[in-house]
Amino acid sequence: MRGTMMDFPLTLVPMLERAGKLFGGVEVVSQRPDRSIARCTYADVYRRTRRLARALELAGIGRGDRVATLMWNHAAHLECYFGIPVAGGVMHTLNLRLHPNDLAFTANHARDRFLIVDDVLLPVYESFRAQVNFERVFVAPFGGAAIPREFEHYEDFLSAADDEFEYPELEENEAAVVCFTSGTTGKAKGVVYSHRALVLHSLAECIDGTFGISHGDVILACSSMFHANGWGLPYTAAMMGAKLILPGPHLDAEGLLDLIEREGVTLAAGVPTLWIGVLQALENNPGRWKIARPLRIVSGGAAVPEALFRGLDRFGIRVRQIWGMTETAPMASMGTIKSTLAGCSEDQEYKIRAKQGIPAPFVEMRVMCPEGEAPWDDKTFGELEVRGPWVAASYLDAPETGDRWSKDGWFRTGDVATIDPEGYVRIVDRSKDMIKSGGEWISSVDLENALMGHPAVSEAAVIGVPHPKWQERPLAVVVAKKGAEVKAEDLLLFLADKFAKWQLPDAFIFASEIPRTSVGKFLKTKLREEYANWEWK
Ligand code: AMP
């Protein structure tokens, strides 16, 4: 029997309508570059978003036309998140931290027609302006400085439109957003998200065990809106009518804690490095912040060290790990503890939490090794492959990348992983970060996580460096906590009972910081370049 249920397209339109009509009184809070706060409500966002959609329609943006944004996390970007796709266009979030050449490449490759740019990001636009050709450029007054006359003012663009917007009849598989991978090697690749993928991803973010977002949440979205849909949080928050805090350009630990305290945040999300900083700020300033409501943190984008779970637990802050990629919209796994494991010891529980979790509903994961699919034995490792309704089926106009998908349609992630008998995935490493020493593999992630468990260590990144005898050997770059002192011998002693001797780093470099990617992860390619000619003693 077919046709018994309505064929109701899963698009962003009903999500926007809900936000405006049911949750009009709920606040959306934006932190400006000078740290002052701008408050509006979903009713304002709704009205302005429809205005934007109408303005785009009047300006000739048709179905599938790309409109780029170059913006921080704030309310006007939220308007773009909805306004461009509900007008039938495709929002391309330009990653403002990319090199100018890469920014130009992504804008040209996506064939962006218009650009909406924050006033404070005009210098970034200027850095690649000569290489691109947008038909129109609108400048959003985020920082409050005068907008040069040569540009169109975003507010004028909105006010010139009327309130007559009518949604086009969108199909759920139409493109809504394009985002490029951060591409630390090779050219960035475009992932095009459909309306349907974004809707289903938002619903999945409401499941207890993922982000568990509910109406009563106050969400601090520290995941950049210029990367991987801001982890989908802007969409899910609007759909659920949860108060949304957008921190603008400021992601320093003390500033985040101020926002958490002041706004009554219940859920904060972002990469682990942010929370490492938050933990240190809490440890260094006892009693400074009163966190009145239970706070949970969802962290991903890089492995979450076990020490971070333990450390923040001491402050009553519960961290949960998720795993995902630009290609998976991004959330694909959930760091939940299954009810059947509830009786395990505290140490076992931390071990489980430090894994990347079980697949989210409708996402399937498998580990492939040369012999075929790896057993769920927690030991056999190979490349992690995924499939599901919000996993990319191809890259934008890049037929040469077809080999990233297996013959039977799974996406090859490039991550090396194991799966345990309970179905928990553990990311051993990014395949290119695995260290091969004397024919045996060493996981840089395991060493990093262990090192970050040392009380004097703030951050640690481990890379494989060419070695005349062993092919590669691990070298650790370590940042000590403020005021703490640590020596290589201490660290070797600390690691001794956790690793075989041959797995231990042969060199420790003490540095003041670790280079980062555009979205705050350790930039290991830079470290590898820096230490390529390291002379082993
Ligand atoms: P991106 O597409 O820039 O978001 O990067 C995706 C990559 O980040 C994945 O392929 C992983 O290598 C890494 N990643 C994301 N989440 C985690 C996690 N929880 N643990 C370890 N690595 C992660």
Image (cartoon, helix red, strand yellow):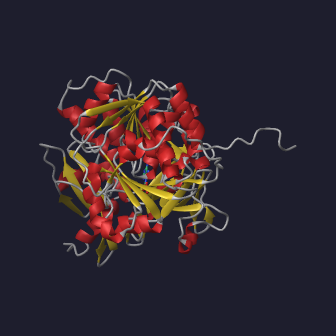
- Residue 109 in the image: state x and y as whole percent: 46, 68
Q: Nearer the viewer, residue 202 or 124?
A: 124
Which residue sits furthest right? 1
Quadrant into which the N terminus falls: top right
Q: Left or right? Give the position of 201 relative to 490.
A: right
Q: Left or right? Give the position of 140 relative to 353.
A: left
- Residue 127 in the image: state x and y as whole percent: 27, 64
Quadrant into which the C terminus falls: bottom left
Q: Left or right? Give the position of 494 relative to 436.
A: left
Q: Could you tell me if residue 116 is visible in this image?
A: yes
Which residue sits furthest top? 292
In the image, residue 207 sits, relative to residue 157, either above or below, namely: above
Q: Quadrant of ligand 1?
A: bottom left
Q: Left or right? Give the position of 361 relative to 381.
A: right
Q: Residue at x 32, y 52 (%)?
A: 520
Q: Residue at x 36, y 47 (%)?
A: 154
For residue 529, which quarter of the picture?
A: bottom left
In the image, residue 352 sits, relative to residue 327, either above or below, namely: above
Q: Residue at x 24, y 56 (%)?
A: 514
Q: Could you tell me if residue 279 is visible in this image?
A: no
- Residue 508 in the image: state x and y as whole percent: 21, 60
Q: Nearer the viewer, residue 290 or 6?
A: 6
- Residue 457 in the image: state x and y as whole percent: 22, 47
